[in-house]
Image: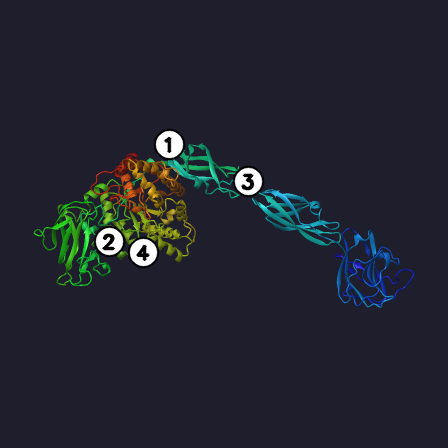
Amino acid sequence: MSLETNGNLLFDDETLLTSYGTNENQILLTNFLNNNKMIALAGNSWVKFKIPTYEITQNTILSFSFKSTSVGDIHAIGVDNDNMISPNQIFQISGTQDYGVLDNNNYLNSTPGTWKNYKISLNQYLTGEIKYLTFINDQNDNQTGNSYFANITLSERLAPKTDTFNTLEDNFISIATNQLISNDIGTSLNITGVGNAINGTVSLNNNNVVFTPTGNFYGNGSFRYTVSDRNGKTSAAAVNIKVKSVNDVPITVNDNFATNKNNSLAIPINQLLSNDSDPDGDILSLIGVNQAVNGSVQLSGTNVLFTPNPNFSGAANFNYTVSDGKGGTSTTQVTVTVNSLSSGDTTSGKLGTNLAGLADYSAQLPFIDGFRTSRSWIPQKWGVWDTGESSLLNLDADGYVKSLPSANSSTYTFVGTILFRDLQGKYPGGKYIVLYDGEGTINYNFDAVKDVTASRPGRDVINVTPSEGGIYISITATDPNQTGNYIRNIRVVPEAALTTYAQQIFNPTFVEKSDPFGAVRFMDWMGTNNSTQSQWNDRPTLTDASWATTGTPVEVMVKLANSLDIDPWFCMPHLATNEYVTNFAQYVKDNLEPGRKVYVEYSNEAWNWQFQQTHWVYQQSLAAGLEFYMDLYSKRTTEITRIWDGVWGTDKERVIGVMGSQAANVWLGQRELSYVWDTTGPKSHEYYGIDAIAIAPYFGGYLGDPNTANEIASWTQNPDGGLSKLFDELTQGGVISSSPQGGALQESYSWMANYASLAQQQGLELLAYEGGQHLVGYWGAENNQALTNLFIAANRDPRMGDIYKQYLNKWYELGGGTFLNFSDIGLPTKWGSWGTLEYASQNSSPKYNALMDVIQSLSTSSQ
């Protein structure tokens, strides 16, 4: 028989011994079947084959399959190391007799007619070498059938075992090959290959297997190795590697910032850490700053404050160190470019104001003609103030009533409007002239009494005594002859201004209070929030009945900017078409006085969900397939600023393209300025027409939270009405449990610093589109009268003026540019104390005086 490398023994005639033993001959009938892998014995057959000499080890296995057709005397297989009559060992599989002491009956379990597989560990029964195999189908006393032996193999048991080793994160482990196979079952084993590494790499280097975990990985890794025995048989096993974690040091990245000469730079700590990381996912903290070059550095609350040496410009730097809280630290460098231009060398640090919205109850009183701020027409009938039928009014293009129902109509029968309502009488009284075109009947009430004798068609004279009521005007008949000559073009003018109001449309008192400011934002005058303006012909016009209902015409706003010699800030409606934007820009270019700059912003606070523009932007972003709604705002902003730049052409340096953002969320500003929506790749800010980023860093807004309203209102029981506690909370914090660290001012300063750093990084100017105190209840807290009273009192307190000066100086100190206070003139209500002055004729207030002081300071520093 021949022996294959896999242990299979094949039958052949050459190794078949023709004589069994030396003393007797046997009857032999053999057949070699199944490609010489099976032998069939019939009758009384004892067959011996010579095999290649095979040394028995503790792992040697003799395996075969057997079947007989019936049970004879002995069916067996034997092994032998010589060619004598009796084998060294016989393993009887079936039969009724035994073969004496050489017979092994441990495998006597065959069933006639059924194949059965056998595996015999030879080392249990003999040692040394074997050279022969004997196959026995014996019949003496019992007639036997045929015996079949198939798939005979002599091989070594090979069973490598799974091993487990340990190593440390970022450390390789080298395992000797003899160590890996030391517990494997097999003979003359040899590792022939390694592979299938998980969470690492593995290689076979001479007599060692080297496993290297993936960088920074810890946990369970593994690989497999292949082993072969002396016969060339192979098998594989797994090796588990337990990688124990170690604390990796943080990975820090150098940073770059810029500031101006003699101007400190406040860098938010979280911004410094934003590009640093920890391989283990640990939370990083900044634990120190040092080694400042050409300046000094210190920790200041949530910021790192770097101050260049006096009058120094050029490259400066400092180091900061971060910790992972587990003993790992890293230090990196921050480079600060100090520009030669100092904050005192620029006029960009202007102080401007927002203008309060136009309304019949606006204390601003901006126009000589009081009808310009009248309420929209109220449909009325006797005994009913408002029938709710405004949709039925027959109005012309300017908003004047063209006709009225008959006097006995079931609907409204006349219309009315109001001027100067709820102003506590804070508007000029005396004699007013009411001018109008057309025919009909106008009546007056509340604060106004008609001088019948002095009046004539088209020109009524009314005597006004100011009160809360205001001036009530009603039209009870119009176009009585049905000729189309209805009452229109109504003007309500103080008698003293009758000859000048058409040319000098602005109230001199309003002009006086507005004149000191360097810029004015027309957001509320334009009706920006929830605007419905889209097409150019939707715009407000000079002939509109009331600009309080339609918004202010661009002609009026440009005229005010020219009259005051200040820079206008316009907010383009969120629905505005490109044609609207183009025509608006063209009018401003053609009519704004030379040298004036113009700020251009898209809508107002498109991140603020209380406004319809935010919902519209969100829906448009979905339609455009953008992943974030403010990407749409960023995109449309750049489209608008590029239109303005295109219209202004070589004069575009006068156009300040503004990207509006949210003060408390610097991430939003970063996102807007990254222009991720541009599928061709982000371009420069100049390409997009963006010159500045603007925020509203209000202070104290959290004090209007309904969750703390009662607690704060309880302060009013104190002898000073709660003002000391309120101002302590504003300036220091810690008075209420929900106080931000350092209080309201410090919270605002951190917002300023975050955006100042962002603006410096991006090479943009930082503006405040709004700002100031934000003491107002919300979500129901506005109805807490004690809270409202406290907030109003605080706005009237001299300490508020001191805070305003500190607050604004901090803004400019941090690198802020033009700051637009919110807002100019307005009476305090439960909806807020926004006005720096409460009414137009008021000459001073703590907030207004503070603004004037800061303006004077800015003017002095720029000289």
- Residue 150's quadrant in the figure? bottom right
Mark 4 secondary-structure assignment = loop
Instruction: Specify few, some or many for label 4: CA neighbours under 10 Å numbering under 14, 14-19, or 20 or more.
Output: some
Q: Nearer the viewer, residue 144 or 534?
A: 144
- Residue 701's quadrant in the figure? top left
Residue 633 percent across, percent down from the top left: 37, 51
Residue 311: which numbered mark, if any?
1
Mark 3 secondary-structure assignment = loop
Location of the N terminus by quadrant is bottom right
The label nearer to you, 2 versus 4, is 2
Report the Cα–Cα distance between label 2 and label 3.
66 Å
The reply to whether callout 2 and callout 4 are in contact (CB within 8 Å) is: no
Relative to 857, is 129 on the left or the right? right
**Residue 339 seen in render:** no
Which residue matches tag 2?
Answer: 549
Mark 2 secondary-structure assignment = helix
Residue 247: which numbered mark, if any?
3
